[in-house]
Image: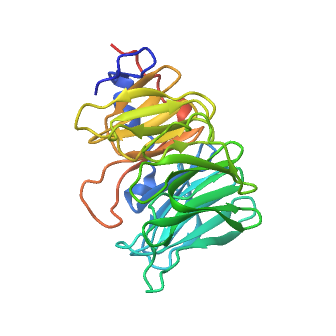
């Protein structure tokens, strides 16, 4: 890995003894006897949401990392084929439930209120007149400040709709129909997405108010972005990848000017495991995974690899599987961010 030659870029630190062994701890015991796929952190420093597959129950659960005890949220109708992908905003869990291993266009979207326990279907894929599901992106629905957003196909030639749901009322609003995709939410709340004027054209970033659905000015951090992968954000900090997936950009807020913080070696691409939470970030450049602290401008390799979910308090890591299998059993590690050692100085 090489970094770009400016003082504003992140530098790669060599893992010290503490970093080499930190992810050997924090094992979620349940992951040794059942298949777990983390969805999101629960924002309490001790639990997370996941897809769980066992002989007795398969579906979405909330897991206490220390005890491995779990609360059932929703059972999957088909424990073999159903999968979930989603996010949590501190109160509301939202997820897309995919009902086919081979057709990502077949899905429903659900919300669960952690305060009341109420679950509601808030969306579903639609079909063409020929009976086939319209093509949709695989991006998970995103929740923030009581709203959820996702994109789904709604016509030929890659046309899609950007949905925004008020999670308290369940009201679903389509804020955009076009060649759009990859929506996410930032403080405001605003829904932001990439859009091209026609199929295959270079994308630009658009924005609308989550409350009213009206188009608004694109936040400054994203205003000049063209053709990048869908950015990720915790509502404030954000990151995205450009330059044939070889350059990582980071910004402390939607209003701050983004900067390129690292560039991978030629031929090595930054994958879609990118996560941000405050000044922390997680990303992968296969076959390695990295944890970064934007405040110190340092990042370090995670020896065990895998992919992670972050929030302001914790990190949950799914380690690489020893073999390919549907619902394989793989170690899951849960660590409070305050338990992580400081990233060593770069040499």
Q: Going by the image, does 7 lie left or right of 61?
A: left
Position of 155 with respect to 217 (left or right) is left
Residue 259 in picture, x, y percent from top left: 48, 26
Query: Which of 263 and 325 lies nearest the eye of the viewer?
Result: 263
**Looking at this view, is 345 or 100 the one in front?**
100
Q: Position of residue 45 (x, y in %)?
A: 60, 42
**Looking at the image, is 249 positioned above or below residue 315?**
above
**Quarter occupied by residue 173:** bottom right
Quadrant holding the C terminus: top left
Q: Can you give x and y, in whole percent of width and height, for residue 312 in the image?
A: 60, 38
Q: Residue at x 52, y 38 (%)?
A: 276
Left or right: 12 with respect to 237? left
Q: How many marks?
A: 0
Confirm whether residue 70 shows in the render: no
Toward which corner of the image does residue 288 lie, by quadrant?
A: top left
User: Which color mode does the image show?
Assistant: rainbow
Q: Residue furthest front?
A: 197
- State the quadrant of the N terminus: top left
| Residue appearing at x 49%, y 37% in the figure | 239
Q: Residue furthest bottom?
A: 130
Nearer to us in this view, 154 or 297: 154
Q: Is residue 138 above or below residue 269?
A: below
- Who's the residue at 50% across and 57% down the image? 181
Q: Position of residue 260 (x, y in %)?
A: 43, 27
* Above-or-below relation of 341 to 242: above
**In this rendering, does residue 321 appear at all?**
yes
């Amino acid at each position: 890995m090489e970094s770009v030659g400016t003082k504003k870029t992140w530098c790669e630190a060599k893992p010290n003894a503490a970093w080499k062994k930190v992810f050997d701890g924090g094992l979620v015991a349940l992951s040794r006897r059942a298949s777990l796929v983390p969805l999101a952190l629960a924002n309490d420093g001790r639990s997370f949401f996941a897809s769980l597959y066992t002989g007795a129950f398969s579906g979405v659960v909330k897991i206490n990392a220390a005890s491995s005890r779990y609360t059932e949220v929703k059972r999957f109708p088909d424990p073999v084929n159903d999968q979930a992908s989603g996010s949590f905003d501190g109160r509301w869990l939202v997820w897309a439930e995919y009902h086919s291993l081979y057709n990502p266009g077949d899905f429903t979207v659900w919300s669960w209120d952690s305060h009341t326990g109420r679950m509601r279907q808030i969306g579903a894929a639609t079909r063409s007149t020929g009976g086939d599901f319209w093509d949709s992106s695989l991006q998970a629905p995103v929740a923030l400040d009581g709203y959820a957003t996702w994109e789904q196909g709604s016509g030929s030639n890659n046309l899609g709709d950007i949905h925004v749901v008020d999670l308290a009322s369940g009201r679903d609003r389509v804020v955009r129909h076009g060649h759009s995709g990859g929506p996410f939410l930032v403080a405001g709340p605003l829904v932001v997405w990439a859009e091209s004027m026609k199929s295959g054209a270079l994308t630009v970033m658009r924005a609308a108010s989550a409350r009213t659905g009206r188009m608004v000015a694109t936040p400054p951090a994203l205003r000049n972005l063209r053709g990048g992968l869908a950015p990720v954000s915790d509502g404030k900090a954000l990151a995205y990848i450009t330059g044939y997936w070889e350059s990582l950009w980071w910004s402390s807020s939607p209003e701050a000017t983004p900067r390129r913080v690292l560039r991978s070696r030629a031929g090595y691409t930054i994958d879609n495991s990118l996560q941000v939470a405050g000044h922390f970030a997680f990303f992968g450049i296969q076959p390695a995974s990295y944890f970064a602290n934007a405040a110190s401008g340092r990042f370090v390799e995670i020896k065990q690899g895998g992919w992670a979910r972050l929030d302001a308090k914790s990190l949950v890591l799914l380690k690489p599987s020893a073999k390919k299998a549907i619902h394989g059993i793989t170690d899951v590690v849960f660590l409070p961010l305050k338990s992580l050692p400081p990233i060593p100085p770069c040499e």
